[in-house]
């Protein structure tokens, strides 16, 4: 927790203007965690869409299928743990 004397001081702390090696390590750890929690689902190939809406729907479907796959994998692991006890 960090206290600030003004809103402006707090706002300035949102951005790292001169990143150091520690900053880049923290960013790398953050993205490692993100990729562990939700691995990227990159499909091979080139896709052609008739509209932005169609492209957005395609991306939504990929995201939904990826989230469902992750959920089911975790659900199966929980079921296996429960069966052992």
Image (cartoon, rainbow, N blue to C red):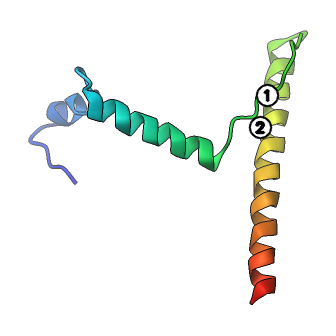
- Residue shown at 82%/59% (left/top)? 72
Judge the density around disc 2: few (<14), some (14-19), many (≥20) Cα neighbours within 10 Å.
Answer: some
The spot of residue 73 in percent (x, y) is 79, 59
- Residue shown at 44%/35% (left/top)? 28
Vertical side of 4 occupied by 22: above or below? above
In the displayed structure image, the side of residue 8 where residue 80 appears, left or right: right
The spot of residue 46 in percent (x, y) is 86, 12
Q: Of the numbered discs in the image, which one, if any, rests on residue 63?
A: 2
Residue 85's quadrant in the figure?
Answer: bottom right
Closer to the camera, 30 or 57? 30
Closer to the camera, 31 or 3? 31
Residue 77's quadrant in the figure?
Answer: bottom right
Q: Of the numbered discs in the image, which one, if any, rests on residue 3?
A: none
Question: Which residue is label 1 attached to?
Answer: 59
Vertical side of 15 occupied by 48: above or below? above
Count of numbered circles on the image: 2
């Amino acid at each position: 927790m960090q206290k600030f004397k003004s809103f402006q001081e707090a706002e300035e702390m949102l951005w790292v203007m001169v990143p150091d090696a520690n900053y880049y390590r923290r960013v790398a750890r953050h993205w490692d965690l993100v990729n562990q929690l939700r691995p990227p689902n990159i499909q091979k190939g080139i896709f052609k869409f008739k509209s932005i809406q169609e492209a957005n729907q395609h991306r939504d479907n990929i995201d939904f299928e990826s989230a469902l796959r992750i959920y089911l994998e975790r659900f199966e692991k929980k079921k296996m743990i429960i069966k052992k006890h």
